[in-house]
């Protein structure tokens, strides 16, 4: 494991809670931790203990110290106790639960749910009241992230000759009830076995459900009848072709299983489901893919059906295998979310279990074709595709658009507007691809339209999605006093008037002010760079643009140079060469 694989969010130190006789308790979003004394008062030269109770939030756990040993000592849960005149023994931890860790790709010991840690102690001083201080250090994790957890608890204890030492809370657990190493308990093993027994049937069920998807349902009867027809009414051959078709479907899922294995073995890392959603580029791509899939559901474009659906497919065993593979591919627009989740889950499981699970989804999807080729009369009992299927597809499309919006919550605010603009452009390109042509459109015209659609998608992706380099130019907000002072000191000033709603301004930022040569010239010549934001009608920059510089619109760049009596106006976004020339003619800073 590598420290880079964990995302540490350092929690604010939790201050001591108010005094409570016999116990001390703190809560946060990770755990509820309570400190309890076995005896509220103890006699000198006596033995007692402390109990620390952890109630972990759902889905969170601490790693057992023995899970990592000396390799990563900072990962395990550690407790330290101190108090004047008290000798503390080693903490006594419960048996750790078995947990399959996605980062290390192995089973580790963790503490989850509610558990207790005991710390025995003895006293060797006379009567006194002192504070017992407990420091807790560890890393709390769930399936997506980890947080550094530091707790400090304190509770007073009285040491007195008159102490009765009544047991108020607990006694030390028996030795066999605790263990400082990872133990695979019978309960844990039973849970793991039960989970597998549940997952495998669910995989078959998921495969069956793929046939109900609107991408597959309309052609299911056509495929089955085509297979039966190719068999020439022979039941044995009909069954063989049905099995061949199911094998073709399974080949698709075998390919998916191979991808899972390659990701785990080829890269030496476990795919950490959730980490990719912290990458704005990945999230943007996923959101736009959801938009395209939604457009498919709305009928703006279609995917080519397997040859079997047109009656032109080749017969025979191998032909049926190929058509089965194509049918599985055809289901992907509707099953994309399911298959993505399955692949992510498979990355957290041992390779044999993950492979079997993925293949069982293929078994579930292919099984109806085998049954229906055996008993073609059952087709009459299957509801026929109709308007209800179209409405179902449309509803699915709206759900996909909702998912796209949800995904954009992980994108920085300043990028969201551009992504939404590009989603509109992408929708137009998809519309051009699927609606602006038909089967009667000449081949040359068809491909010219589609080439134009692809070209527009690429150009606008560059303009809207490729963020300009940050930090190249040290922009200052528009301030008339700052500009006036710079002019008094003979410092050159560059003012870029822009607005969030201005598309040409975005082009200018990417083609001119993200250029390293321009940025280096501005720095080396000591130019004061001012960005005038005219997004709002009544902003200071908006008023200056109209009243001071008499410019009607943005984008516009104003140069105030020491040797020029009047401002130099560079309007539009095709100013790179002129701006470069003006900057090169300036003296270097300090000359």
Image (cartoon, rainbow, N blue to C red):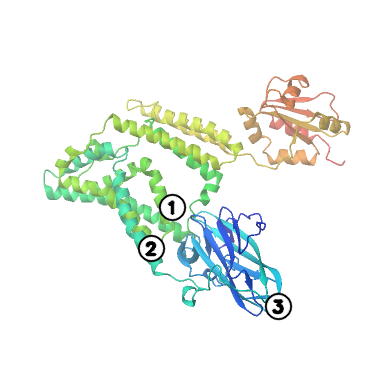
Q: Name the disc covering residue 192, or none.
A: 2
Residue 85 located left or right of residue 464: right
Which of 591 and 412 lies nearest the eye of the viewer? 412
Task: Check the picture and name the quadrant holding the N terminus.
Answer: bottom right
In front: label 1 or label 3: 3
In front: label 1 or label 2: 2
Which of 13 and 492 lies nearest the eye of the viewer? 13
Secondary structure beneath label 2 = helix
Residue plotted at (77% across, 22% down): 549
Residue plotted at (11% across, 46% down): 234
Q: Name the disc covering residue 336, or none.
A: none
Residue plotted at (28% across, 40% down): 306
Is 167 placed above or below 206 here? below
CA neighbours of label 3 inside 10 A, class few (<14), some (14 to 19), many (20+) = some
Cα gap from disc 1 to disc 2, whole angstroms? 19 Å
Q: In the rendered image, is residue 5 in sight?
A: no
Q: Residue 364's spot in the image, x, y percent?
A: 28, 50
Q: Residue 62's spot in the image, x, y percent?
A: 53, 62
Q: What residue would you read off at disc 3?
A: 125
Which of 524 and 249 lies nearest the eye of the viewer? 249
Is 214 placed above or below 142 here? above
Q: Name the disc covering residue 344, or none.
A: 1
Secondary structure beneath label 3 = loop
Residue plotted at (62% across, 27% down): 502
Which numbered disc flags the more N-terminal residue, 2 or 3?
Answer: 3
Q: Quadrant of residue 377?
A: top left
Task: Check the picture and name the quadrant holding the C terminus.
Answer: top right
Q: In the rendered image, is residue 126 in sight?
A: yes
Q: Residue 112's spot in the image, x, y percent?
A: 49, 61
Q: Residue 433's spot in the image, x, y percent?
A: 41, 31
């Amino acid at each position: 494991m590598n420290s880079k694989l964990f995302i540490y969010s350092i929690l604010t130190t939790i201050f001591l809670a108010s005094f409570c006789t016999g116990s001390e308790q703190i809560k946060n979003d990770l755990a509820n931790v309570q400190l309890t004394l076995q005896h509220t008062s103890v006699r000198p030269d006596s033995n007692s203990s402390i109990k620390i109770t952890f109630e972990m939030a759902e889905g969170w756990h601490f790693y057992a110290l023995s899970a990592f040993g000396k390799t990563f000592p900072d990962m395990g849960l550690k407790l330290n106790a101190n108090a004047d005149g008290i000798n503390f023994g080693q903490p006594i931890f419960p048996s750790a639960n078995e947990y399959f860790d996605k980062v290390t790709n192995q089973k580790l010991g963790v503490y989850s749910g509610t558990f207790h840690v005991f710390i025995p102690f003895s006293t060797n001083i006379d009567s006194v009241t002192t504070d017992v201080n407990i420091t807790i250090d560890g890393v709390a994790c769930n399936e997506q992230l980890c947080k550094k957890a530091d707790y400090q608890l304190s509770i007073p204890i009285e040491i007195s000759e008159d102490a009765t030492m009544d047991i108020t809370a607990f006694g030390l657990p028996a030795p066999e009830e605790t263990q400082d190493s990872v133990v695979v308990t019978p309960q844990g093993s039973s849970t793991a076995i039960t989970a597998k027994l549940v997952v495998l049937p669910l995989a078959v069920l998921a495969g069956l459900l793929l046939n109900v998807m609107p991408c597959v349902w309309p052609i299911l009867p056509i495929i089955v009848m085509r297979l039966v027809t190719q068999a020439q009414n022979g039941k044995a051959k009909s069954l063989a072709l049905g099995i061949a078709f199911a094998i073709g479907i399974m080949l698709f899922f075998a390919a998916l299983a191979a991808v899972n294995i390659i990701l785990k073995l080829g890269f030496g890392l476990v795919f950490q489901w959730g980490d990719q959603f912290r990458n704005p580029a990945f999230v943007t791509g996923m959101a736009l893919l959801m938009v395209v899939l939604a457009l498919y559901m709305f009928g703006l474009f279609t995917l080519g059906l397997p040859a079997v659906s047109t009656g032109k497919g080749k017969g025979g065993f191998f032909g049926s295998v190929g058509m089965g593979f194509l049918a599985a591919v055809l289901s992907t627009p509707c099953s994309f979310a399911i298959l993505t989740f399955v692949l992510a889950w498979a990355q957290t499981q041992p390779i044999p279990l993950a492979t079997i699970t993925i293949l069982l989804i293929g078994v579930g999807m292919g099984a109806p074709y085998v049954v229906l080729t055996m008993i073609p009369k059952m087709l009459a009992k299957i509801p026929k595709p109709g308007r209800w299927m179209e409405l179902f597809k449309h509803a699915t499309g709206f759900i996909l658009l909702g998912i796209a919006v949800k995904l954009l919550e992980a994108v920085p605010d300043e990028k969201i507007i551009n992504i939404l603009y590009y989603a509109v452009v992408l929708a137009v390109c998809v519309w051009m691809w699927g609606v602006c042509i038909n089967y009667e459109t000449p081949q040359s015209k068809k491909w010219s339209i589609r080439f134009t659609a692809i070209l527009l998608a690429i150009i606008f992706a560059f303009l809207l999605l490729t963020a300009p380099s940050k930090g190249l130019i040290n922009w200052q907000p528009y301030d008339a006093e700052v500009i006036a002072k710079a002019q008094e000191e003979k410092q050159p000033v560059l003012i870029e008037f822009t607005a969030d709603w201005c598309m040409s301004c975005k082009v200018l930022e990417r083609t001119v002010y993200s250029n390293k040569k321009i940025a280096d010239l501005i720095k080396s010549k000591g130019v004061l760079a001012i960005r005038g934001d005219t997004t709002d009608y009544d902003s200071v920059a908006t008023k200056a643009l109209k009243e001071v510089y008499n410019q009607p619109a943005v984008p516009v760049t104003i140069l105030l140079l020491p040797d020029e009596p009047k401002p130099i106006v560079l309007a539009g976004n095709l100013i790179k060469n002129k701006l470069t020339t003006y900057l090169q003619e300036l003296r270097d800073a300090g000359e």
